[in-house]
Image (tube, rainbow, N blue to C red):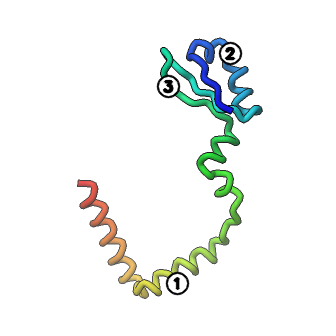
Amino acid sequence: MMTQISVSETSRNLSHWINRASYGREIVVITSRGRAKAVMMGVDTFEDLIGLGDYAERDRMPLEQLREEFRQALIEAGYRTREDISHLVHEVKAEIAAEQK
């Protein structure tokens, strides 16, 4: 459900609208002079909107497994030695610097 309210209504009854957004899972569009200016929504709705809930619920990979998979990916890409990896890092830094100019 979506409701439009004015800035003045928002300021008069802020806790009411926060509760409706949070507990009622209502999206509140705040207007000024008839034009939408901001949106108020509960945290659950926001997390659903950006997919944060899915991300937070994923199983985390153990650090050692992450390191091993990253190492394996580097080897498969042709970066087998520390020197190869160091050269890669320098190339990436140069590309980033060039893009920032």
Going from the N terminus, do you reach mark 3 or mark 1 first?
3
Mark 2: few/some/many CA within 10 Å (<14, 14-19, 20+): few
Give the foreground label among 1 and 2.
2
User: Position of 24 compared to 32: left or right?
Assistant: right
Return the residue nearer the eye: 77 or 85.
Answer: 77
Three-letter amino acid code of the residue under disc 3:
Lys
Q: At numbered mark 1, what does the secondary structure look like: helix, strand or loop? A: helix
Tell me where residue 66 appears, x and y as whole percent: 59, 74
Q: Amino acid at mark 1?
A: Gln
**Vertical arrangement, residue 59 with respect to residue 15, above or below:** below
Q: Viewer-nearest of labels 3 and 1?
A: 3
Looking at the picture, how far across and down is residue 56, in whole percent? 67, 55
Q: Residues within 10 Å of mark 3 (few under 14, many from 20)?
A: few
Q: What residue is rendered at 27% in x and 55% in y?
A: 100
What amino acid type should be assigned to the residue bearing mark 2? Asn
> Closer to the camera: disc 3 or disc 2?
3
**Quadrant where the C terminus is found in the figure:** bottom left
Q: Quadrant of residue 16?
A: top right
Residue at the spot x=61%, y=30% of the render? 40
Query: In the rendered image, which residue does mark 1 sit on?
Result: 72
Of callouts 1 and 2, which one flags the residue occurring earlier in the amino acid sequence?
Answer: 2
**Residue 18 in the image: x percent, y percent?**
69, 26
Q: Is residue 5 above or below residue 95?
A: above
Residue to which mark 2 is pinned: 13
The residue to which callout 3 is attached is 37
Give the residue at x 71% y 21%.
15
Q: Are marks 3 and 1 in contact (CB under 8 Å)?
A: no
Choose the circle earlier in sequence order: 3 or 2.
Answer: 2
* Measured Cα–Cα span from mark 1 to mark 2: 57 Å
As measured in the structure, the alpha-carbon distance from the residue carrying label 3 to the one carrying label 1 is: 49 Å
